[in-house]
Amino acid sequence: MIRNFDDVFKFAKERGPKTIAIACAQDAEVLNAIDEANKIGIADAILVGDKKKIQEIAKENKIEIEKYEIIDIQDLSEASLKAVELVSTGKAHIVMKGLVDTSIILKAVLNKEIGLRSGNVLSHVAVFDVLGYDRLFFVTDAAMNIAPDLNTKKQIIENAAIVAHSLDIEKPKVAAICAKEKVNPKMPATVEAAELERMSKDGEISGCVVGGPFALDNAVSVEAAKHKGIDHPVAGYADILLVPTIEAGNVLYKSMVYFSGSKNAGIIVGAKAPIVLTSRADSEETKLNSIALSVLMAAKQS
Ligand SMILES: CCCC(=O)OP(=O)(O)O
C-alpha cells in the first residue's frame, strides 16, 4: 500500500516510464516538472505548443530541450487537440495540461472524433499527503463536476476508488462529507450521503466502502469521531473524501495547499487515459507529483 509521495515515486519508477503529451507546454513549472520526471526515469514527453516560447523557457531554466520532440502549434485549442490525438493514436499514454484553461483541454478530451471519451463520468481526484497522517487522502471533486447528482456522485466515488487502487489501496474507505454527521432533510447532501452508504452496502457501488454523512472532523480523526460518539468503520479512517459540490472541494483543496502546506497531486479520471490537471498556481513539485500519480494510473489502465 502506498502511503505518501515517496512511495508514489518509488512505484512510478518501477511501473514507468510513460510518455506524456503536454498541451501548451510553454510554462516554466510544467517544463521543469516534466524534465525532472524524465531525469528520474518515470516519464518521457512530447511538447505541443509555442516552440519559440518553449525554447526560451528551456534556455532560461537550463533544460536540454533537444531531448524532447516539440510540435509547434500556437493556438491553444489546436495544441490541446493535438496532445489528445497523440494519446488516442497510441503515441503517448497521458495528457497533461500546460498553460491553458481547463475548459479548453477538457473540450479536446471530449472531442467526438479524436477525444478520449470512455462513456464514464470524468472527475477530478486530488491526492494529499498531510503532515501527521500515515495515509494519503483523495479529495473529489474539486475541479470539474459542479453540483453532482446522486448517480454522478456514485461514479465520482468509483473513479476515485480506481485511483486509490492504482496506489495499491485495495478497498478504500469513502466518507461522503457534509456539514454534519446526521441526516437533515433540509440539507440534501446529508440525504444523498446516507443513500450512497445504502448503495454501497447493497453492492451498487464497487471497489470501496462508503459511509455518510460525515463532517470532515469525524471522517479523518478517530478522536473526533469518538468524542461525538460515532461508531462506524469509516469514521476517522476515511481515505476518499467525497465533497458535495465543487465549492466545498475547491475550498478544501486550496485550504490544504495554502494553510497546511500539504503535498498534493491532481488528475482527471474516467477517460481512456489519465489527464494531469493541477491548479495553474500549483507549484512545480505538485506538477511533478501529479506526473508520478498519472504514471501509476496509466500503468493500471494499460
Ligand atoms: C485542481 C484545482 C482546479 C483549479 O481550481 O484550478 P485553477 O486554480 O487553475 O482555477
Image: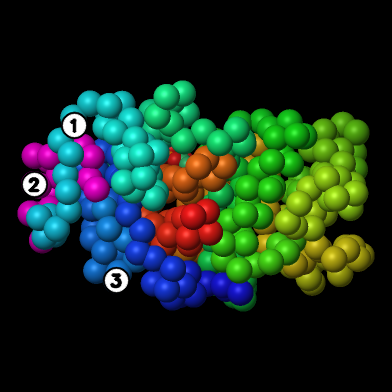
Res 105 → quadrant: top left
- Residue beneath disc 1: 73
Instruction: Work out whether residue 145 can be spotted.
Output: no
Numbered label attached to residue 21: none
Q: Secondary structure at mark 1?
A: loop
- In front here: 36 or 183? 36
Res 246 → quadrant: top right
The residue that appears at 11% across and 60% down in the rendered structure is 64
Instruction: Work out whether residue 148 can be spotted.
Output: yes
- Residue beneath disc 3: 40
Give x and y (percent) for residue 73: 18, 31
Q: Residues within 10 Å of mark 2 (few under 14, many from 20)?
A: some
> Left of 150 or right of it: where is 259?
left
Report the span colored magenta. Answer: 46-62
Q: Amino acid at mark 2?
A: Glu
- Give the mark, 1 or 2, whose residue is nearer the N terminus: 2
**Label 3 C-beta lies within 8 Å of the nearest ligand 1 atom:** no
Q: Amino acid at mark 3?
A: Ile
- Residue beneath disc 2: 56
Q: Secondary structure at mark 3?
A: loop
- Give the mark, 3 or 1, whose residue is nearer the N terminus: 3
- In front here: 32 or 51? 51
In 3D space, how far apart are the residues under numbered discs 3 and 1 (Cα atoms)?
Answer: 28 Å
Q: Residues within 10 Å of mark 3 (few under 14, many from 20)?
A: few
Q: Amino acid at mark 1?
A: Ile
- In front here: 299 or 267? 299
